Amino acid sequence: MIKIGIVGGTGYTGVELLRLLAVHPEAHVEIITSRSEEGVRVADMYPNLRGHYDELAFSVPDTATLGKCDVVFFATPHGVAHALAAELLATGTRVIDLSADFRLRDADVWAEWYGQPHGAPELLGEAVYGLPEVNREAIRDARLIAVPGCYPTSVQLGLIPLLEAGLARTDNLIADCKSGVSGAGRGAKVSSLFGETTESMKAYGVAGHRHLPEITQGLRRAAGSDVGLTFVPHLTPMIRGIHSTLYAHVPDHSVDLQQLFTERYANEPFVDVMPAGSHPETRSVRGANVCRLAVHRPQGGDLVVVLSVIDNLVKGASGQAIQNMNIALGLDESMGLAHPALMP
Ligand SMILES: NC(=O)C1=CN([C@@H]2O[C@H](COP(=O)(O)OP(=O)(O)OC[C@H]3O[C@@H](n4cnc5c(N)ncnc54)[C@H](OP(=O)(O)O)[C@@H]3O)[C@@H](O)[C@H]2O)C=CC1
Ligand SMILES: CC(=O)N[C@@H](CCC(=O)OP(=O)(O)O)C(=O)O
């Protein structure tokens, strides 16, 4: 069995890791940390996990005990993995970080967008960006994996077929994205209150959201050139889910886009290209490690619209983290993830 540690076990992505790992046949969660809930049993706090983790209780983060695990997931705010990753890697523990700490290749760009110096620039050389659909070979045997952000996962998967094929104009891409409130984490914030988010919807971060440099880094790689992207995230009155409506100018009409997308993802277990004319819904991916895509060319014009939906907590975070673990450890990539059980 793979010995697993989770740092940040009381948060939304930490609990989602527990939910998914409960049915992973090779994983055993040995340690789960929380600074605020030390000693509390996981199943007492999360009754949906009763019968799976009856002996497991939250403990404070401690690198000596975490270092005995084979894999440690960081489900923590940015900066925490910066502080602890090097020590764990030195003990031979693999680190899979759900935060943004190792996603950007350039420490200065990270510092600019996250408003603090990068805490472990010496590790950036070995950090692997964990988007399996573009980086699978590098993930195999990786010791330090940066799991992509939720918006970046849905936007990159939707646009890279057009960019890799050299079909989309790269100077005026648009990503109009809607997220459920769980994207903001479990911490108490006025902006996440029921009364602030129900029966209302708003854009935010129009001037510049911290996922912009992560998305453009990935799109640049797919296009092989610089890209211009307008990215506007929105908060919507749902708990889970991201719906991205993506716009790209594709002046070449000779390529069958449905076929292009279908072939690009033909061997991808967790990307579903829906039939032509489809409108994927976030509820169709709820609880599942899946991105569903649909490609449209309205009225036969030059503007192509790609619709991309994921569950922000699964393909946008914890499910993708486990997919990365499976690849890195040489397991079946779908292990523990193949039954996309719907949430109650
Ligand atoms: N929510 C989402 O949809 C997504 C989140 N992410 C990223 O994943 C990470 C976790 O997100 P999420 O689960 O939503 O966050 P939450 O705010 O829900 O949970 C954060 C967790 O980290 C722990 N924590 C906070 N500060 C520290 C610290 N200094 N040292 C150790 N543990 C700490 C908290 O527990 P305690 O305070 O008790 O220690 C809590 O368990 C973030 O970096 C987020 O950006 C990525 C993709 C999607
Ligand atoms: C709705 C909401 O607030 N979403 C979060 C993004 C999700 C997230 O957790 O950020 P990372 O992917 O960078 O880790 C936000 O906009 O800040």
Image (cartoon, helix red, strand yellow):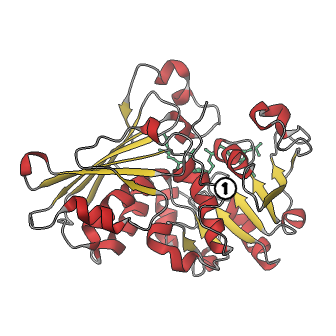
Closer-to-camera residue (266/40): 266
Residue 24 is situated, as x and y percent measured from the top left of the image, at: 72, 55
Disc 1 marks a residue whose amino acid type is: Gly
User: Residue, x 56% and y 24% (percent of image)?
Assistant: 193
Residue 129 is situated, as x and y percent measured from the top left of the image, at: 52, 70
Horizontally, residue 73 falls left or right of residue 114, namely right
Horizontally, residue 25 falls left or right of residue 132, namely right
User: Residue, x 15% and y 67% (percent of image)?
Assistant: 255
Please say whether residue 227 is visible from this viewpoint.
Answer: no
Q: Mark 1: which secondary structure?
A: loop
Horizontally, residue 106 falls left or right of residue 218, namely right
Q: Which residue is mark 1?
A: 336
Residue 335 is situated, as x and y percent measured from the top left of the image, at: 65, 61
Residue 194 is situated, as x and y percent measured from the top left of the image, at: 54, 21
Closer-to-camera residue (40/20): 20
Q: Quadrant of residue 243?
A: top left
Closer-to-camera residue (220/166): 166
Crowd tier of the residue under label 1, counting other residues whose Cα lies within 10 Å: few below 14, some 14–19, many 20 or above = many
